[in-house]
Image (cartoon, grey):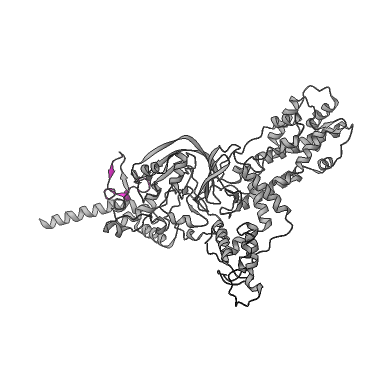
């Protein structure tokens, strides 16, 4: 009886094995659920650092950045796709100790997952897919052959109507500009805005003087002043009594003024045509209202100038643009060489000392500190002493190094030389022009109190009444998982958040670990919920029988090891982007902090919560230490602006330049050239 029983058990066991394995192996050798796939995935985790592809983002630091071309990206909308791997283990180590059981230590000492990867699986697709050469809006002639109103009594107005109907050599404008300009003239009964029977008016001359200053705002004056308009601006009154010629000048000047006004107010580029990472609606200009306002203005140049962005940062950029253009000589670069420590001599010390004085890190008295502290018997020539890196200069260097976000050594080293030399004058001029263009895409009213995240600087600023009242470091998306650019409103602060693990992470990152230890999720503090919301053991689930259609929810409860940290800030948006705490504190020490899958990790979330909620520190700490998951609505939604500026002023108004980590400058510069060509 024992033998048949044994045989029966063997048969049952064999059937069970076949039932378990058959649906797995039927999917083919490349299915993630095969043991071979598990081994390949584990090998990838061993070989890759940071993203499972062999790219080590932990070395992405300050200085000259030589970035690879961005890889195909996973969108954050419903079409988003899969590409997840774990960050290096050390990046997820908590700052607070955690007691682990022996079995937990045997399974995983420092397991962690990026909480932000995209939620679904499919063909890799970049938000920039389909965005090739920038295509500006199509230009059409400023005429309407179907224009057939009642003829106005004034002869000059009749000439304007005729020019709009069949005029030869009509200027090129967009469809919307054409329609709005013609609407204005219809309402005004085709009375001219800029010319009289005697020639161009004083109003026209003042407007032309403003168009001639377009370069001051980083625009191209040639786009608004074709030769015959430029001649008028120089004092030519036009052809007196020649109504057809005057009507042609009238329409030319109106088209040029409208183009200038829109470019100054809303920008030359439509950002959402430039990249899929932009989700912006630049402020629109009402053209009919503009022309009516100009018709009543005795000083149209002031009205036009006021169309520029009112934000203080724009004024700083404009002033710096003028300063750089007026500077006649390029600054002497600091030559490269061996590291110079405090107390050592080097000819480059003279250049560095002068640079620290000009930048404000060293006082006039400080530049003479090298004369002090020498022993009476020292017999070196005075010039030799002057080349000594003295204590005052070393202190100044540390202050500069802190500003440049590099290691504070007080020495003249390679990183310091690179920071002192920085980009060339021409490169900085180009950056200013591009970032002034980006400023025009911002809402005119950012909110009296608002948050601005500069992705290029990896910095968050809290601004109240145009003053930066607090700032902190942040971590933004990697070059291949960039953070989107958009504006929204923060509504909720979540204390002790749960991390709901995306199904794709469960299938592609956790299943290999569960194959070795069915208790993996239990041992590491994850909760598994069935379709009824009841908690079950991870070992009770036959994970491999579901493929990627896993019907169970996996979540990480609140705690020090939670991938979202202790606080999450929600501003609901179509990109599933939010701000949150993180246990990976070490990454904030990096100069360039592009490590996430798109969300924004905040270095000091408790302080941010204080400002956002208006609570004191003790109340924030109490909410966190309670361990309870809780959502707190903000009393008044707080505007949040996620943007990308490679030139931006700090809290003191000093303009800083940042690496183009997403290579958006190159794309924008090319687009601006395309627009210039199209308008000529």
Magenta stretch holds residue 364: no
Q: How many marks?
A: 0
Residue 541 covered by magenta stretch: yes
Left or right of 418? Residue 80 is: left
Q: In the image shown, does 371 or 546 lie closer to the viewer?
A: 371
Q: Which residue is at 18% across, 54% downward? A: 9
Quadrant containing the N terminus in the rendered view: bottom left
Residue 90: % across, % down: 40, 59
**Left or right for 617, reference 223:** left
Camera-side residue: 350 or 581? 350
- In the figure, residue 420 lies in which quadrant? bottom right
- Look at the image and give the residue range highlighted in magenta: 533-550
Q: Is residue 629 visible?
A: yes
Eyeballing the image, is 348 above or below 191?
A: below
For this orientation, the residue located farthest to the front is 376
Q: Which residue, as the protein is rendered here, is positioned at the far right?
A: 241
Vertical placement of residue 166 versus 565, above or below: above
- Rendered-image quadrant of the C terminus: top right
Front-lying residue, 449 or 123:
449
Percent position (x, y) of residue 248? 82, 35
Image coordinates for residue 31, horizontal then vertical, percent: 39, 54
Q: Is residue 118 visible?
A: no
Expressed as whole percent of the image width and height from the top left, the position of residue 202 reads 82, 34
Between 325 and 358, the residue placed more toward the observer is 358
Q: Residue 351 sits in which quadrant? A: bottom right
């Amino acid at each position: 009886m024992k033998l048949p029983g044994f045989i029966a058990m063997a048969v049952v066991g064999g059937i069970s094995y076949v039932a378990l394995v058959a649906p797995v192996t039927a999917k083919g050798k490349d299915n993630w659920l095969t043991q071979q796939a598990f081994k390949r995935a584990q090998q990838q985790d061993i070989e890759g650092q940071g993203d499972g592809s062999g790219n080590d983002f932990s070395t992405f630091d300050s200085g000259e950045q030589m970035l690879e071309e961005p890889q195909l990206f996973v969108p954050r909308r419903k079409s988003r796709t899969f590409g997840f791997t774990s960050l290096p283990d050390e990046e997820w180590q908590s700052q607070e100790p955690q007691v682990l059981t022996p079995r937990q230590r045997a399974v995983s000492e420092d397991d962690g997952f990026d909480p932000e990867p995209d939620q679904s699986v499919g063909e890799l697709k970049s938000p920039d897919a389909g965005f090739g050469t920038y295509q500006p809006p199509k230009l059409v002639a400023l005429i309407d052959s179907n224009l057939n109103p009642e003829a106005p009594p004034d002869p000059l107005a009749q000439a304007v109507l005729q020019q709009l109907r069949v005029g030869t050599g009509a200027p090129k404008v967009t469809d919307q500009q054409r329609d709005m300009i013609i609407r204005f003239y219809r309402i005004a009964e085709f009375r001219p805005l800029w010319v009289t029977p005697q020639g161009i008016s004083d109003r026209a001359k003042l407007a032309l003087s403003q168009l001639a200053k377009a370069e001051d705002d980083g625009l191209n004056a040639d786009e608004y002043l074709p030769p015959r308009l430029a001649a008028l601006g120089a004092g030519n009154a036009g052809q007196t009594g020649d109504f057809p010629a005057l009507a042609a000048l009238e329409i030319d000047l109106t088209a040029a003024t409208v183009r200038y006004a829109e470019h100054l107010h809303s920008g030359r580029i439509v950002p959402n045509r430039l990249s899929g990472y932009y989700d912006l609606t630049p402020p629109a200009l009402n053209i009919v209202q503009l022309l009516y306002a100009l018709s009543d203005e005795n000083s149209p140049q002031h009205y036009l100038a006021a169309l520029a962005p009112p934000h203080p940062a724009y004024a700083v950029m404009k002033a710096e643009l003028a300063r750089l253009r007026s500077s006649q000589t390029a600054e002497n670069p600091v030559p490269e060489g061996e590291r110079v420590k405090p107390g050592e001599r080097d000819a480059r010390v003279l250049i560095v000392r002068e640079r620290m004085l000009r930048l404000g890190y060293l006082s006039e008295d400080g530049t003479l500190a090298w004369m002090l502290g020498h022993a009476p018997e020292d017999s070196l020539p005075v010039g030799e002493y002057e080349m000594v890196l003295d204590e005052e200069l070393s202190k100044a260097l540390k202050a500069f190094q802190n500003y440049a976000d590099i290691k504070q050594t007080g020495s003249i080293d390679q990183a310091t030389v690179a920071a002192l030399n920085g980009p060339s004058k021409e490169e900085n001029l180009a950056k200013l022009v591009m970032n002034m263009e980006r400023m025009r895409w911002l809402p005119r009213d950012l909110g009296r109190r608002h948050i601005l995240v500069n992705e290029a600087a990896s910095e968050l600023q809290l601004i109240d009444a145009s003053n930066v009242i607090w700032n902190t470091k942040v971590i933004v998306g990697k070059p291949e998982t960039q953070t989107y650019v958009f504006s929204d409103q923060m509504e909720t602060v979540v204390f002790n958040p749960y991390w709901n693990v995306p199904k794709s992470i469960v299938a592609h990152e956790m299943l290999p670990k569960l194959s070795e230890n069915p208790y993996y999720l239990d041992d590491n503090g994850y909760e598994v919920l069935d379709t009824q919301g009841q908690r079950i053991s991870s070992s009770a689930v036959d994970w491999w029988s579901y493929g990627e259609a896993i019907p169970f929810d996996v979540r990480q409860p609140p705690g020090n090891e939670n991938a979202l940290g202790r606080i999450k800030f929600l501003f609901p948006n179509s990109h599933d982007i939010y701000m949150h705490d993180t246990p990976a504190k070490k990454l904030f020490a990096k100069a360039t902090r592009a490590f996430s899958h798109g969300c924004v990790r905040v270095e000091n979330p408790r302080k941010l919560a204080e400002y956002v909620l208006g609570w004191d520190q003790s109340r924030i700490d109490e909410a966190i230490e309670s361990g309870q998951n809780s959502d707190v609505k903000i009393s008044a939604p707080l505007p949040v602006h996620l943007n990308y500026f490679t030139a931006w002023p700090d809290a003191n108004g000093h303009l800083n330049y940042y690496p183009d980590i997403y290579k958006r400058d190159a794309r924008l510069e090319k687009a601006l050239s395309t627009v210039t060509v199209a308008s000529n």
